[in-house]
Every structure is written in C-alpha cells, then in structure tokens.
Amino acid sequence: MLSPLYGITILGIVIILESSNYIEFLSGWEIMTIPAYVAIGLTRKEFSPAYIFMAFGELSSALLLASFIIASANTNTVSFTQLISPLPLILATLGFIIKMGITPFMVSEWLPIAHGTAPSNLSSVLSSTMTLMGIYGILKMSDLTQSIPIAFSLLVSIIGAFSVFFGSLYAYVNENTKGILAFSTIENNGSILVSIGLFMFAKQLGITSIENIAFYTIIIYSFAHSIAKGGLFMSTGVQKSQAISFSKKVRDKYYVLGLILLTSSMSGLLSNLGGIAAWLTLENLFIISYVLHSLISIIFIVIGSIMAMGEGFATALLVKYITYLSLFRVDRKKIDKLLVIPVLISGTLILVFGNILPYLLYPYKTSLSQLGILGNLLIVTEYSNKIFGAISPYTLPFL
C-alpha cells in the first residue's frame, strides 16, 4: 500500500534534480513532501508525527516560494539565472535548513519525531535523500548568487558546526535507534553545511582553490552520508525493538550488508569516505584561517574545533551502535561466524572507496615520493599552487 507513495516521493526528488526553473523545483519539492506525510500518517494510528512533519515541510515550502518569487521578480524570468540580490539565497537557505532539521530547529526534535515514526525503508529515504535535497538547493542558489554577504557565509558554517556537535551529542545519548539515526543525519548535514559556508565565503573572495576543495568535499560527504545511512537503516530494520539496549541477535543477510555499508563510510575515521570528507573540511578551515591572518581566522578555528569535537562524538556513537547491535545478547560463536564476511568485505570497500573514489571526484593528488609514499596515492590540499596538507588512506595525515 505504501509502495506508490515511496515511488512518488522519489519522483519528486528526480524532478528537483532535473529542474531548470523555480516552478519545476518547487513542484518537485511538494511532490517529494506530501506523499511522505501521507505515508507517515498511515503507518501509525497517532497522526501527530505526520502533522508535525507536514507543518515544518510547508513552512519550508513557504520560505522557498517567497525566495523564488523575489528571484523571479528581480530577473523577470522563472528560469535559473544569475542573481544580484542575496535575499533569495538567504530565504531559501532558511527554508532548506528547516526541512533538514538543522540547528536551531533541531531543538524542537521535529525531524527525529517524524522520521522515527516512519517505517525503516521510508526513513532511509527521508534521512539520506530528502534532506540532501536541501543541501542541493542551498548549493544551487549559492551558485546562482553573484554577491553573497560574508557574514551570511560565516553564519552558515557556524550553524553547521553547532549542528555537528549537538546532533552527534544528542545521537550518542539517545536510546531509540531511529532517534539515533535522525540526529546522526543532522550531524552529517551539519558537516556538509560547514563546507557550503566555506564555498560561499571563498566564492565571494575569489579564492578559487578553497572554493574547489569545498565543492568536492560536499560531493564526497554527500556520497558517504548516503552509503552510511543506507547501512544504518538496513541494520535497524531487522530489529523488532527500537530501544538500542534491547537489541537482539543478528537475524539475516540485510544486517550483514548494512554493517558493511556502515563501516565502509562512517565519518570521523580514516580511511573511509566519511573520514576523508571530514579531513578535507577541517583542512579547508585551517587553510582559510592561515590565508586570512585576521580576526576572522579565529572564527574558522573555532568552527573547526567545534566540528572536530562533534566528529569525535559521531565516531563514538557508531562504535556504540555497532557494539550494541553486534555483540550484546548474542551467541559469541554465531556472531564471530557472521562477522567474518562483513569485516573482510568492509575492509576491502574501505580500500576501494578510500583510495579510488576520491580520485574520481577530487582533482588534487600528487606523488610526493620524498615522503616514502607510493606514487600518486596522496590526496592533497593546495593553495596558490603550493601543497598545504596531504593524506593517504594507508598513512597518517601529513601537514
């Protein structure tokens, strides 16, 4: 019964990605939202979570509508064209972060309430795909805007950093598995938002190197977020209880596959995709603070420190999550047998994803043979054609 609703939601996402004007984008946004509201309402007899989801979703749509009307009035067209005024970007960003549950809207916990009520297959779409449409929308509007206020780009990164910290902290202390996943989504999106703020800041100042690093970091982080969330929802979907302390033994192949996807992309740890994306974000923050050599540099250092603490909580969260679902209340012989396959496969995927995929998405790499590293196996950050830092999935970071 819910399958058509899932299909319509995915159709809305496709329309957003393929849209060439504001009308198509907003239509896709609504087509994506409304079926999800119906599916959440049909899942439970309690309709409050569905109403909460719809209320925040339509508040987001209202802000997007205002943004698009102003943008169309300024350009005399509904097509995506360059914008002189930053007001459409500011309004649209506010609308997008509402839909993503980012700080300060995280305190209402509307996203964990709504997403936690939905079945696991719908929650995976809501958390890993629908919220990333907000990331796509902000990036799209920032790319169209010619003049972005410096204060606004800093605010975006600050909001992202606090979302990383509090999202991961709330997730770590949460007992409900779906609540953990919802706050983890906020943490991941916050990390991406930090890079979007850097992208805006560097674009405004014309610092091409930092702008490029931020753009590719957004892509890698989004990819890692999707893989990790897919693994998280596959592993929780086989559990009858949503209380992590009452999780039961591993049940089927879906848990094994979910564990493989999770461990090969979780953030904060090298050499997986999430670890590389987190390193690139922190590296970019340090580069820009070094380049500016001003009071603003302190802001970027603080943002980096807050984000680093949040990534620490995120790593501890996932270790806790895997431990509870894999080691407690199980037969040790059975778990040892079941974990052989995911450990081997996830280790292989870490090597593949960590060493190959970043090179397909990220343009900076070098040999640096004097460091004793195999040729062309270092991902580097550059400024003014000079290497600032480098990292290899086989080694520790080099600064």
Image (tube, rainbow, N blue to C red):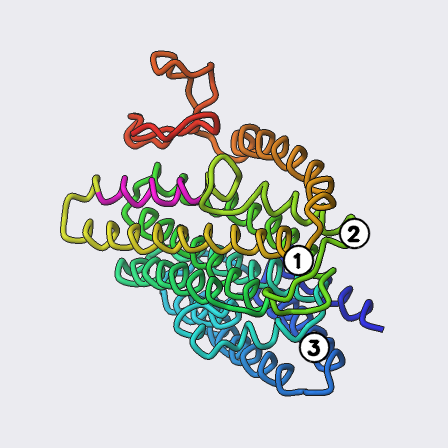
Specify few, some or many for label 1: CA neighbours under 10 Å numbering under 14, 14-19, or 20 or more: some
Residue at x 35%, y 50% (from the top left corner):
308
Kindly report the secondary structure that dominates the magenta region of the rendered protein: helix
Helix, strand or loop at mark 3: helix
Question: Which residue in the structure is indicated by mark 2?
Answer: 252
Residue at x 69%, y 58% (from the top left corner):
14
Task: Look at the numbered discs 1 and 2 and tell me whether their residues touch, using CB distance below 8 Å.
Answer: no
**Residue segment shown in magenta:** 278-289
- Distance from disc 1 to disc 3, alpha carbons, whole Å, reads 31 Å
Residue 64 painted magenta: no
Question: Which residue in the structure is indicated by mark 3?
Answer: 40
Task: Look at the numbered discs 1 and 3 and tell me whether their residues touch, using CB distance below 8 Å.
Answer: no
Counting from the top left corner in percent of width and height, residue 5 is at 77, 71
- Residue 219 sits above or below residue 235 on the image: above
Counting from the top left corner in percent of width and height, residue 69 is at 49, 74
- Residue 245 sits above or below residue 212 on the image: below
Q: Is residue 148 left or right of residue 313?
A: left
Specify few, some or many for label 2: CA neighbours under 10 Å numbering under 14, 14-19, or 20 or more: few
Residue type at the position of mark 1:
Arg
Helix, strand or loop at mark 2: loop
Question: Which residue in the structure is indicated by mark 1?
Answer: 329
Q: Quadrant of residue 280?
A: top left
Helix, strand or loop at mark 1: loop
Furthest residue to the left?
294
Please state, as top left, top right, bottom left or bottom right, where the N terminus lies in the image: bottom right
Specify few, some or many for label 3: CA neighbours under 10 Å numbering under 14, 14-19, or 20 or more: many
Q: Earlier in the sequence, mark 1 or mark 3?
A: 3
- Distance from disc 1 to disc 2, alpha carbons, whole Å, reads 16 Å
Relative to the observer, which residue lies in front, 291 or 250? 250
Judged by depth in the image, the label closer to the viewer, 1 or 3, is 1
Residue 285 painted magenta: yes
